[in-house]
Image: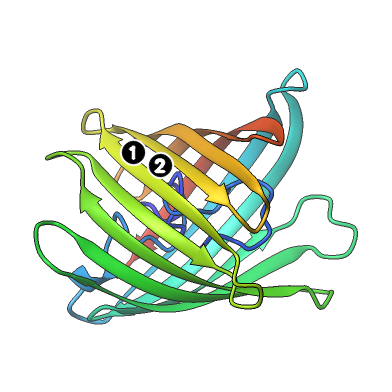
Amino acid sequence: MFKTLLGAGLSATLLAGAALAQDNITVGADPIFDPVQNRPVLSWTAGIAATARFATSDDFDHAENEVEGFVELAYSGFHGGLTITTLYQDPADDVEYEANLGYGAEFGNGMSWDLTYGYIWLNNTDGHSEEITATLAFPVTDSVEGAFAVIVDPDTGKSDQEFAFEAPLNDRWSLVGLVGNSDRDDNVYGELGAVYAINDSTAFQVLYEDTNDSGGLLGFTVSYEFGG
């Protein structure tokens, strides 16, 4: 699975304070749809994704660009990684970093769990945050996979709660979606999109993101992933 494209987020790596659910349980280090507990030997994965987003409530005006790169190591359920994401027109910082460390395991009937700690910081200012993500992944049908995640800010005790799904449409196309409630941002948010697997390493995604307190964004992402 593509780390950045699935999810519409487990990106079990939901960045604290994000206005939209851009990184959530169907996009990001992806213990949900690509469980690291299935890797019995030391393995690594890396990738890069480029995204352009447009404001659906403002005549589809260009809203932002984003480039994200990541590397992840996994061994027998343990996993750790680093994600670097560019910030669009930020007056003080150019890049956001996230380091994460976690462990996941299966417990039968196609179900798995994962617990991940993430630390997020910026390249120039002192802005930083932490989060702990607990994820439960499960089959919804024979082909549809689902996941539920709770993302807790240990400093405040507030959390986000998310449900995500992935439904293959054929051997190339998949439908992805997510709904979430944020106690941290005091809003409700959602994502719905489609992923096209160009080949085993490259994918294209169209994703609509929205919240109940701001306008929606339509994003187009190209992603390349490799590993060994």
Residue marked by disc 1: 197
From the image, tell me which residue sits under label 2: 203
Vertical order, 75 against 58 (above or below): below
Alpha carbon distance from label 2 to label 1: 4 Å
Q: Position of residue 197 (x, y in %)?
A: 34, 38
Kind of residue indicated by mark 2: Ala
Q: Check disc 2: other Cα within 10 Å, few if <14, some if 14-19, many if 20+.
A: many
Q: Quadrant of residue 109?
A: bottom left
Residue at (10% x, 64% y) in the render: 108
The number of callouts visible is: 2
- The quarter holding residue 142 reads top left
Q: In terms of depth relative to the viewer, which is nearer, 53 or 23?
A: 23
Q: Are marks 2 and 1 in contact (CB under 8 Å)?
A: yes
Residue 99: x %, y % from top left: 55, 76
Query: Can residue 1 be seen from the camera position used here?
Result: no
18 relative to 196 in the view: left or right: right
Q: Determine the residue positioned at 30% across, 60% down.
A: 136
Q: What is the secondary structure assignment of the residue under circle 1?
A: strand
**Amino acid type at mark 1:** Ala
For residue 59, side relative to residue 110 (left or right) = right
The residue positioned 43% from the left and 74% from the top of the image is: 116
Left or right, 7 with respect to 166, comes to right
Q: What secondary structure is marked by label 2?
A: strand
Q: Is residue 38 left or right of residue 10?
A: left
Q: Quadrant of residue 122?
A: bottom right
**Residue 38 on image: x %, y %:** 19, 69
Compared to 58, does 125 lie above or below?
below
Q: Is residue 97 visible?
A: yes
